[in-house]
Image: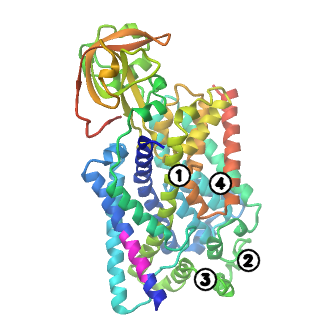
Amino acid sequence: MTSRSSRAIAAWIDVLALVLWGILFLTYWATGKLYLLIHPNYMWLTVAAGAALIALGVWRAIALLQQARNRMAAGNASHLSLLPKGWSSSLLVLTAILGLLISPRPFASQTAIQRGVSEAPTLTRVKPQAFRASSNSADKSIIDWVRTLTVYPEPDAYTGQAAKVQGFVIHQADLPDNYLLISRFVLTCCAADAYPVSLPVQLTQSRAAYKPDTWMEVEGRMITANLNGKRQLAIAAKSLKPIAEPKNPYDY
Amino acid sequence: MEWYQLNSAFTLFLSLLVEAVPFLMLGVLFSGLLQFFVDERRLVQLMPRNPFWGALAGSCLGFLFPVCECGNVPVARRLLMQGVPSSVAIGFLLAAPTINPIVFWATWTAFRDQPELVFLRIGCSLTIATLIGWIFSIQRDLRPLLQPNVARAMPGRSRDRAGELEGAEGPALLQSGTYFLGQSAQPVDAAQLSAVAALNPTAGKPAMYKLTLMLESMVQELRELGGVLVLGSAIAAVIQVFAPRDVILALGQGPITSILAMMLLAAVVSICSTVDAFFALSFSSVFTTGSILSFLVYGPMIDLKGVGLMLSIFKPRAVFYLFALAGQLTFLFALLVNLYGT
């Protein structure tokens, strides 16, 4: 009798786990937090999985209720598992609750430094399919600039072009005090593979005025700066204005 | 541990799960379909008896079951439980995440400019998976290397041997039944019960009943593998945060060091094989071709997130053999490409 009731409880924990995970996925999608975790191209997978999980949970719940009414033996409640009995579902329930309570946060400057922001300009995801005319260079995002640079790295070629980019601030210790990096993370699939790209920004004052991780829109002109013995493309800032953190902080 | 690290570890953890769970569900669905809607005897008959051809056939099965490295585990495990030769199942386990239409397409999209890399990826994965499947077939009875509950669910050993029992109609099933009962000291597992129940008495039962059983076994597999995936992703996330990527990449860019760095990165980053080509592309300008290849070949076979899933089939010893063999072969091929390739 006790074994039957404990099996029934285990079966209901399964239902709880399924439904909670479904809710978790759909909540992330509905609140836009999914943007922080995964590339928009793959979001439908998560959404479909969320719906399927809820459907499976509901189906399981109905089956359990029917079984209880028919006094049938409880279903497959024993385990085929590495983890001790009951751990797996409890772990799933716990994780889903944590996921619902704790909001995922976009990565910040510390992570960017850790992931090697200094090498970023050598990275490129997809070779640009089209070049934009220099007249609208102000439309280029940080990643556009970095990709263009990968194809044609001579910084002098861009001198004087207008730049207007948005990103978050990184203070890099080995840059002079009047330089900061304006950065964004680029996502290829999910946050696990996010890598930072950035452009140096030349300020007219100390970077201390702009805290790390604050989001800024930088406007200015492109110059060639000599940083750490390397000639690099940089933005000579005319204005920096703080902006709200975008709902989707990544670039693709 | 600082706050931002905990924060990024949690975000990483969630992002791995958000991406992996759909594929795990797909794998569990295929596994359920295999269990309840595919006649295991016909399946086993279709498989080549010769271990080498079996391993090759298993490696190509990914075209039928396009799953990534989370979805392949339930399917491979189900194949083993259905009595498919071990060379086929291991070939499938290692190759399916790469040798399938989705991954082929994704790799092609990413590396359009270097088509040789696409074919090298497919070729090397196929070769390595076939070789390892073949090597494992030397172990005639794989059961000592498997987790006890998988081993118990496998049909009697005599079935693997040249099918002497093929002629005699049901005995194989009966045998496996007796086999369980003989082990009466062990608790008889529900999956076996449902497997036996499903294979034998449902033969004439309506599809609706089979569907119910299938959904039930899917829930069970999801629960079990989901828990393991959660643990694996947590470990992968923590290691990514504490062994930062620049440390790994700083291992070097020489012909040998670059391969080691990219293989280590592949194991740590744990991203899904359906999209890893795009990630690898971001390194293609700074890393050697061989090292990019090693990332594309090794990553789908082995990653931190998936270790737990692998352990749901194999004992740790066997998982280690798989890691070591796959790692050495990948390294060898990548080195050949670096030294003699273009």
> Of callouts 3 and 1, which one flags the residue occurring earlier in the amino acid sequence?
3
In the structure shown, which secondary structural element does the residue marked by tag 4 occupy? helix
Residue B335, percent from left and from top = 69, 33
Give the labeled residue for mark 3: B187
Density class for disc 2 (Cα within 10 Å; few <14, some 14-19, many ≥20) is few
Chain letter behind tag 2 = B
Give the labeled residue for mark 4: B56
Q: Is residue A153 left or right of residue B266?
A: left
> Of callouts 4 and 3, which one flags the residue occurring earlier in the amino acid sequence?
4
> Of callouts 2 and 4, which one flags the residue occurring earlier in the amino acid sequence?
4
Report, in whole angstroms, how far the alpha carbon at label 4 lies from the one at label 3: 36 Å
Identity, as a three-letter code, of the amino acid under mark 4: Leu
Residue B64, percent from left and from top = 50, 58
Which residues make up the magenta segment? A8-16
In the structure shown, which secondary structural element does the residue marked by tag 3 occupy? loop
Give the labeled residue for mark 2: B164
* Any part of residue B108 in sight: no
Colouring = rainbow
Report, in whole angstroms, how far the alpha carbon at label 3 lies from the one at label 1: 31 Å
Q: Quadrant of residue A171?
A: top left
From the viewer's perspective, is the residue at label 4 or at label 1 nearer?
1
Identity, as a three-letter code, of the amino acid under mark 3: Pro
In the structure shown, which secondary structural element does the residue marked by tag 1 occupy? helix
